[in-house]
Image (spheres, grey):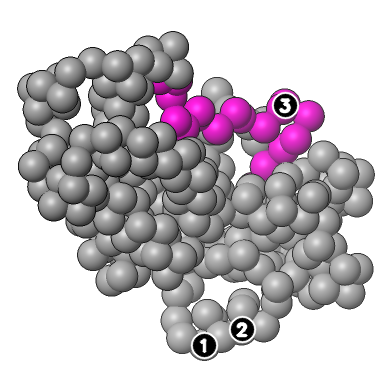
Amino acid sequence: MKDVNYLISHGVDVNKSLELFGDMETYNATLPEFLNGVKEKVPQLENYKATADMANYAIIVHSLKSDAKYFGFMELADVAYQHELKSKENDSDYVYQHFDELIEKVQNAVDIANTYLGNEGSSAMVLTPTSPIKKDKKILVVDDSSVIISFVKKIFENEYEVITADDGEQALKIVEQEQDSIAAMLLDIMMPKVNGFGVLEYFKSHNLFTKIPVSVITGAYTKEMVDMVFQYDIVDLLAKPFNEQNVKQIVEKTIHRSEWLSV
């Protein structure tokens, strides 16, 4: 174990911590509990971010903030506090954009704590990047716009196999043939031949929502449209125009439903 000056030189507010713990002996004995807590909380945060569950995200990040303050990791506490405020405002965009910054601060605190305790070999990344789905698992994008299809394919070209259909009729044929390998579907509503509602009705009548999670992407974003699509067991709805971050977020959320259904 290193001297307390190691903590101080790395920005840890030890004096503030001692207001709670009283002495360094108690601080040192309790510090491993901080590390154990981080290992539990970070995967929870990742899951709640993936599903845009900001209510539960706020609860966990509040706990992380409090633990960081107790042990004097004020930079982490400050960043976690911003995440707490934004998640309470249901600002999932902020959480998504700044999640890597939070993880960086978490990792820094973990590295400092492990080095101080003499556990230099234990400072592995607290959050391993999510492994992409194997290429035998596919995302089905159903849209009559070649621009949208090309856009989505480019985003995920290094992660998933993206298969496409430009109308609902073609999509249903693909689903019949490959439903066991489709991890998620992004579905447009306004299409020729069989439109998106036709696909949703088919999924409902054949109990396919439990096999292939569906999120809707549409340019016809009205209250009536929202009410109609959420009569079906879809994961979420994304309005056009959207950007790369929006698409990544909804696919991550939809894929997460797929992984949950397979458990």
Whether the residues at callouts 1 and 2 have beta carbons within 8 Å, the answer is: yes
Picture disc at residue 135: 3
Picture disc at residue 224: 1
Q: Nearer the viewer, mark 3 or mark 2?
A: 3
Residue 138 at x, y = what percent?
72, 37
Residue 208 at x, y = what percent?
84, 63
Question: Which amino acid, by three-letter code, is at mark 1?
Answer: Glu
Whether the residues at callouts 3 and 2 have beta carbons within 8 Å, the answer is: no
Question: Which residue in the rendered view is the most extreme toward the top?
Answer: 121
Question: Which amino acid, by three-letter code, is at mark 3?
Answer: Lys
Quadrant into which the N terminus falls: top left
At mark 1, the secondary structure is helix
Q: Which residues are magenta?
A: 123-146
Residue 160 at x, y = what percent?
63, 31
State left or right for residue 116 relative to residue 231.
Answer: left
Q: Is residue 240 above or below residue 157?
A: below
Between 175 and 10, the residue placed more toward the observer is 10
Q: Is residue 112 above or below residue 80?
A: above
In this rendering, does residue 107 appear at all? no
Q: Pick whichever of labels 3 and 2 is earlier in the sequence.
A: 3
> Which residue does the image show at 91% across and 68% down from the upper left?
206
Residue at which label 2 appears: 228
State left or right for residue 83 relative to residue 131.
Answer: left
Q: Residues within 10 Å of mark 3 (few under 14, many from 20)?
A: few
> Which residue does the image show at 28% across and 71% down from the upper left?
89
Residue 82 at x, y = what percent?
20, 56
In this rendering, does residue 134 appear at all? yes
Q: Residues within 10 Å of mark 2 (few under 14, many from 20)?
A: few
